[in-house]
Image (cartoon, helix red, strand yellow):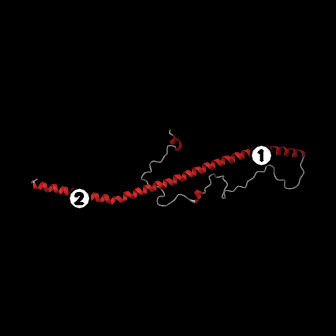
Amino acid sequence: MGLMEKLFGGKVNTDAPGQLAKGSKGELAIGVDKALAATDSSAINPHNVDFSSIRTAPVVPKPRYFTATEAGALQNLATQKREMTEHTKKAYKALKSVDTSDRVVHQLHRGYQGKVAQNEVARLKSNTQLAEQIHSSRPDYAQMHQRVEVADKTAVDAIAKIKESYGA
């Protein structure tokens, strides 16, 4: 398996020559919903807002006294949460870095796709120019065809006259 097959799964499109591309008559497959669709169903955006939070201990709704056992348990929990907070900071920092890298790759790919789209338009413009040139030469071909037919008829008639003169 070659590099191109590995990259593209062996599906490079080579069967398109001579085929009209979809959208060649002005209709588009680009809609606002497609262009602005979330890249992930859980991504935060104006249509998918999430104000959830984390709360390890319930809110104490009114003043109260705590027992020594409750106070000790809460102190242990606070120590555990402080330690977990440090790990969480590292994890979120790493997640932000990963997401930033993903965004950069996404942007690079979109830039590549944009260039492919521009190049496709340039290719199709070139094909259009060639088609126009070929079509503009059709009257010349028709005229040359007619001239060849006239020459053929003239030659056939001349040969027939020669044969007549010999009595053939």
| Residue 165 quadrant | bottom left
Left-right relation of 73 to 112: right
Query: Is 131 located above or below residue 81 in the figure?
Result: below
Residue at image coords 20%, 58%:
154
For residue 141, the mark is: none
Residue closer to the observer: 123 or 35? 123
The picture places residue 143, in percent across and down from the top left corner, at 29, 60
Residue 75 appears anywhere in the view: yes
Query: Is 82 located above or below residue 34 in the figure?
Result: above
Q: Amino acid at mark 1?
A: Thr
For residue 150, the mark is: 2
Q: Nearer the viewer, mark 2 or mark 1?
A: 2
Where disc 1 sits, the SS reads helix
Q: Residues within 10 Å of mark 1 (few under 14, many from 20)?
A: few
Left-right relation of 97 to 1: right
Question: Which residue lies most toward the top here?
Answer: 1
Residue at image coords 12%, 54%:
163
Label count reads: 2
Q: Which residue is mark 1?
A: 85
Q: Residues within 10 Å of mark 2 (few under 14, many from 20)?
A: few
| Badge 2 or badge 1: first in the primary sequence | 1
Where disc 2 sits, the SS reads helix
The picture places residue 36, in percent across and down from the top left corner, at 60, 57
Residue 20 appears anywhere in the view: no
Residue at image coords 58%, 57%:
35
Q: Amino acid at mark 2?
A: Val
Residue at image coords 43%, 55%:
127
Left-right relation of 138 to 5: left
Left-right relation of 34 to 64: left
The picture places residue 115, in percent across and down from the top left corner, at 53, 52
CA–CA distance in space, label 2 to label 1? 96 Å
